[in-house]
Image (cartoon, coloured by chain):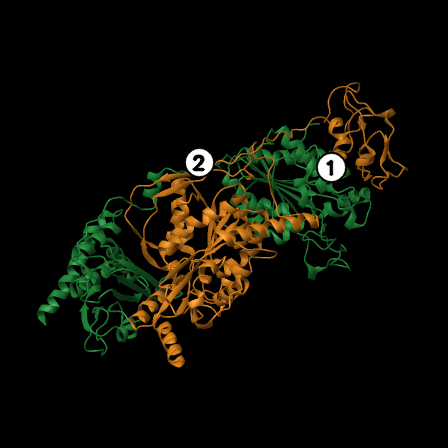
Chain colours: A green, B orange
Amino acid sequence: MSNVFYEKFERHSHGEGLKGQSTHYCPGCGHGLIQKYLAESIAELEIQDRTIAVSPVGCSVFMYYYLDVGNTQAAHGRAPAVAIGHKVANPDSVLISYQGDGDLASIGIAEIVQAAQMGIPLTVIFVNNAIYGMTGGQMAPTTLMGQKSATTPTGRERLTGQPMKVAETMALLDGTVYVERVALYDNKLRMRTKKAIKKALQVQIDNRGVGFVEVLAECPTHLKMTPVETERWVKEAMEPIFPLGVKKDLDSDPWFHLEKPSFEPDRIIEVVGATSEETDRHCDGFPTHIDSHDIGLKLAGAGGDGAQTAAMLIAKAAVTEGFDSTHIPSYGPESRGGTSYADVHVANEEVLSPAAPRPHLLVAFNAPSLEKFGPTVQPGGTIVYDSSVIAEPPELDPSVTLVGVPCTEIARDLGAAKVKNVVALGALQAATQLFPRETFLTSVRQALRHNCAMIELNEEAFGWGARAFEEMAGAN
Amino acid sequence: MPTGNTRTRPKPFVMPQFCKACGRCIDACPKDCISLGTQIESSTGFTPVVLDLEACNGCGLCFSACPEPFGLAPVPNEFETELFDPAKTFGPRQSTAIEPVAIPDERIPLPDLEPLVLKGNHAAAIGAILAGCRHFFGYPITPSTEGAELMAKLLPQIDGVFVQAVSEVATINMMYGCGGAGMPCMTFTSSPGFSLMVEGISYMIGAEVPGVIVDVMRGGPGLGNIAPEQADIKLLCRGLGHGNTHAPVLAPSTPQEMLEMALLAFELAFKYRHPVVIAGDGYLGQMTGRVTLPDSMVKPGMPEWAVWGDEMHRGNLISSIFLAEPDLEAHNIRLNEKYERMAAEEQRADLYQCEDADWLIVACNTPARMAKGAVQKLRQEGIKAGLFRPITLWPFPIDALASIIDNVEGLLVVEGSNGQLEDELRLAMSHAGIRHPRIENVRHFGGILPSLAEIVDKLTSLLEVAA
């Protein structure tokens, strides 16, 4: 009989004495049989070198003592997650996630449901013996109604739940291709179990999905019966609640395939958006007319106003010119709408405090933003606000320059309300000379390099914003 | 099913010491050849079955009813009763796994690249890619999610794998599997998510599985908020799950360092076969800044201990179980030695104007930037302040501090938590036997970080009182 058990169980108490050749399982325990059929199936399918067995927590925690395959021992309930980690690391490996009823259906229910729904090819062996074995006979999710256990001393009743039908549940999930419930109490069923295990491995080898076998197994010790009595109990008490049979057997195509990861430097550089191409610089030096070494900006509006994008364009422009820059976004809890503030710093050498509680420059897209942050602007600073939205700016420090530009109207006239932030940037540039116009436009072009059709519109928006300021300044 | 006629089908035999007397074979035999014995086997205390094979037709049903690998078995062709050595009796096994050898990493040079403008989270993700990470597992949580999102976008373009796990618990266990397979993998999370991961991190430490976890610390306790705090320091340095656990904790303070720490974290994770944590704060995750890329990238090799799923690595085991107490003590001693090696070799700190400083400001992450600004301001006012910035929070860079502490009047610990950084500092000084000077603090909680002005005011007022 060919199988893949170790010749000597070195990991079982260092293989000393009888432990070198006998398992730690109690007499009559179902685990021994199931692992025997696994060992035979692995040998027959010739996948010993590809197989990784994930031992769970529970009585089968020491499965790695016995199976001569790659072995990983997982935390309680997490074997399917561990198996997924292995499988995506090496898609050619064959993963066995072996779990008991407490492991799979109680503490690990989330992990098995994800695995069975995702359908990354795995083989799951689920050993249902209606009891917690290793911890000493407590109630399992599969414990029968009325069944006594260490934590249901008078028998399981409604308050402690009802036996969970795992195979049927797994069959409902989209990632399983083959689900069967089998048992071990007679010769015919033992043959059937072996076949089911082999098939559950085959569907994985074929890259089709999850093969799931639930085995009704005997735990004579905690059922406090002889092994033969336990076989009868499985037949007479368990089987009516957990009917045997194939729950799902899809005729599906292989789908799972992963390419070998790329380590081509050119490809990596492109993907991370890096380039060796230098961008032209247009600044003569740091805009010291605003601050000697560190300029704070705040851009504030509602979500969707484009404050963050505009902030990002300023930060990129600054870095392109060789300065340091930071941008911190701040949002309300809403995914859309709500408030959206951006703090930006541009420093000659290094930004130290990235928050901008006292900005030199403020761009406000709505009245609440202007009211909130207008008074925080440093004396001599500049505020650009959207005069299409804010009709009456509040009274502010007279040393602060207020620039009202109808950003929304201009953007609408251009046929794209969302470019109002670029209109505001144009006005900001013209009003403050933070950087030369071409610096900003380069930043805009780079941001849109994958969406070139939008470049012209954005350049136009920027130009209109600048012109709006110039007209205003001329009029004053 | 055994095939062939009765003459060639082998009959069973059993070695009494491997029979647990469960009796499954008795039930399985259609010819009633097997019965429970009466003789107690002295080596086991069980009463093994006895075989009376007169009626046996070699159907073989008893073999597949026996739960023991070395239990009932077919009589080998040349069976000799003296030959009761199981290794010989049960025939050869395929235990031919070859000795695994490590395949080293490859360093691939990169051309000169223009600096990028990146969010801290994005910088760490790109750092991971350049460190050779092609496997990401994660669960969305603000303010760390942009890292996961960028990985979800970029990894498929370079034939990597992004898996959104069902929870942080599943995440860390997927990392346990992938890291156990010898592959560099990572996740991004934030404080509540990190809390969920600590059991898994303890398993990774116990089983010596590498992996990189970025914790972008947010306000707590509980759901708290999504603004920056540094109140996971205690958890990261003193509470990485149950057992004797420690792991390197790296504290970047700029998007540039988010990238650099990601590179360092993978290096340490594989050097020590250990998880490594990058502790950022909410600002750092969200903050955009200038990031210069390194001059090389890594193509990872394959460690010899990996459970990869091939012939070479078949003999390997990833496990944190050591059932016998002496075995687990020995394992702990080995881990403790590893921690000592980390403490000796991996302490990192950035010292700014510390040489002649009377007062040292101790700060990490984003608050260290404000602290640096405060040092500049204080120096302008003639106050000799310096910045001591731990880059490794564990191991705490006590050696660098010890070398300058003698001339220091006081330490001002600036942090976004209720003394968690200060506790690390005090503990490290205590262990090192350093008589510490006066320790003062500037602390904020709930998503507010200490400001430059507060630091300056605090130190100025301390000095005024002293004067």
| Residue B212 seen | yes
- Secondary structure category for the residue under label 1: helix
| Residue at the outermost front position | B407
Amino acid type for the residue under numbered disc 2: Lys
A263 and A102: which is toward the camera? A263
Q: CA distance from mark 2 to mark 1?
A: 40 Å
Can you say whether B260 is above or below B396 in the image? Answer: above
In which quadrant of the rendered view does residue B130 lie? top left
Say which label, 2 or 1, has the lower sequence index: 1
Answer with left or right where residue A41 lies relative to residue A434. right
At x 24% / y 44%, what residue is drawn? A277
Task: Check residue A20 in the rendering and tell me which mark sits there, or answer none.
Answer: 1
Question: Which residue bears the numbered disc 2?
Answer: A260
Looking at the rendered structure, the number of numbered marks drawn on it comes to: 2
Q: Please report, as a chain letter, where disc 1 is located.
A: A
Mark 1: amino acid: Gly
Residue A148 horizontal/vertical position (percent): 77, 56
